[in-house]
Image (cartoon, coloured by chain):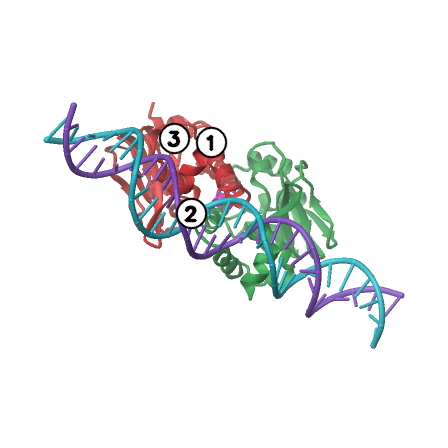
Chain colours: A red, B green, C purple, D cyan
DNA sequence: TTCATTTTTTGATGTATATCAAAATCGTTG
DNA sequence: CAACGATTTTGATATACATCAAAAAATGAA
């Protein structure tokens, strides 16, 4: 079965007709490490997932790159902004490993919501799950020291450490690479 | 019209039957400053709104209260956690002014989603909007200094300053009251 | 393996913010 | 108005983290 549809089914039932329609709109990409999936200002893809690989979302602040999240295999992600409004995301999305992606375009997703209103149940569940993840991130940034945030991250995404360099982790945590190095000692 | 329903309608259409059913399940409360709407561990209410008044959500960390958000009139809020899972919220919710609340219980909301699947469109829109608000809060905590976070807050909720004391604001910003006082000078 | 490049660590110093204590100000009530 | 409690400000000092520079270690290509 199409891996993106498999993930969608974790949130609610899909009947055969809907499933086929979605399947026809899911695009597969194979991308190399370093390539971009999305650059700031584009709004091509809404939800997507990796069957293989690793991705980061980042943006620029004062000329520096700051990572906003990392995506690993078999999670659904995407930017809510282009789904909710018609504004593009302000984030860039880049592959940190050679990856395989299944994605659905914003316009297709909105067509599907219109055509099959029952899909909104799955859309609601996904958005609610995203809220919970975001709330945890807020809690971490609001209440934890650098060292606590580091431990929270490796608890949440334990294999990240083996897959990305410490500069990326530090940028996600909102600290410098030097501080992260000292924390780890 | 019931003020909570009025807010719900901003997110999508409600036909008359659904509207009547919701209306019967919306509860009205009138509460005094200092009273609690929810304490940690309860999971009574899902979504609610104030027609009058002001509310804060807070939790304890190392024996100290930390504010996670403030709610003013005519916004919809609530904790996503009890809607998405059946876990209670870890937050406490307290009135900072004498207030009037319209609320719907978690169980009623879930009944309604089951009975009228088209309601999921509104539920999805609300959750997506919450995601966008949470993303802005993350951006602020991740990238801004204390003084920048202060300015972001007064831009987002300008009348908050006239309604709550600076200790509450500092706690929301993740700084001490002393630092906030120095920032403001 | 060797060399160049990238990543990580270390050191010295600066800055933002916390902590604790106390003073000043404000708001409320007798 | 006077006096009390709550809120806000000020001051002195401590701590967490940033910055800049350089060394050390790891990685990868020839």
In the picture of the structure, the residue carrying the numbered disc 1 is A156
Q: Are marks 2 and 3 on the same chain?
A: yes
Q: Please provide percent x and percent y for residue A5.
A: 37, 28
Q: CA distance from mark 1 to mark 3?
A: 11 Å
Image disc number at residue A80 = none
Q: Earlier in the sequence, mark 2 or mark 3?
A: 2
Q: Which residue is mark 3?
A: A161
Location of mark 2 (residue): A84
Residue at 34% over, 22% down: A1
- Residue B114 vs residue A143, the one in the foreground: A143
CA separation in Å, label 2 and label 3: 33 Å
Please provide percent x and percent y for residue A62: 35, 55
Q: Is residue B71 visible?
A: no
Of tags 2 and 3, the one toward the viewer is 3
Q: Is residue C25 depicted above or below B125 in this figure?
A: below
The answer to whether marks 1 and 3 mark residues whose Cβ atoms lie closer than 8 Å is no
Locate residue A4, reporting x and y percent. Answer: 36, 29
Residue A154 showing in the rendered view = yes
Q: Which residues, given as a range, are shown in magenta?
A: B123-128
Label 1: few (<14), some (14–19) or many (≥20) C-alpha neighbours in 10 Å: few
Circle 3: element type: helix
> Could you tell which of marks 1 and 3 lies nearer the N-terminus?
1
In this rendered view, identify the residue nearer to me: A114 or B155.
B155
- Comes first in the chain, label 2 or label 1: 2
Residue at x-position 60% and y-position 39%: B109
Q: Is residue A115 left or right of residue A38?
A: right
Where does the image place residue C6, in percent across and percent down from the top left? 25, 38
Considering the numbered disc 2 on the image, is that residue within a helix, a strand or a loop? Answer: helix
- Mark 1 against mark 3, which lies toward the viewer? 3
């Amino acid at each position: 079965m199409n891996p993106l549809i498999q993930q969608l089914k974790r949130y609610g039932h899909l009947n055969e007709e809907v499933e086929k329609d979605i399947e026809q709109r899911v695009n597969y990409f194979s991308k190399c490490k370093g390539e971009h999936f999305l650059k700031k200002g584009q709004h091509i893809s809404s939800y997507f997932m990796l069957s293989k690989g690793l991705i980061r979302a980042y943006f620029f602040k004062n000329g520096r790159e700051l990572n906003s999240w990392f995506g690993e295999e078999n999670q659904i992600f995407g930017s809510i902004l282009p789904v909710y409004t018609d504004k593009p995301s302000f984030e860039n999305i880049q592959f940190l490993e050679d990856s395989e992606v299944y994605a659905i375009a914003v316009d297709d997703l909105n067509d599907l919501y219109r055509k099959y209103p029952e899909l909104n149940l799955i859309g609601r569940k996904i958005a609610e799950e995203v809220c919970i993840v975001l709330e945890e991130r807020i809690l971490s940034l609001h209440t934890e020291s650098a060292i606590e945030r580091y431990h929270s991250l490796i608890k949440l995404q334990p294999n990240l450490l083996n897959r990305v360099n410490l500069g990326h982790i530090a940028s996600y945590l909102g600290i410098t690479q030097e501080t992260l190095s000292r924390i780890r000692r």
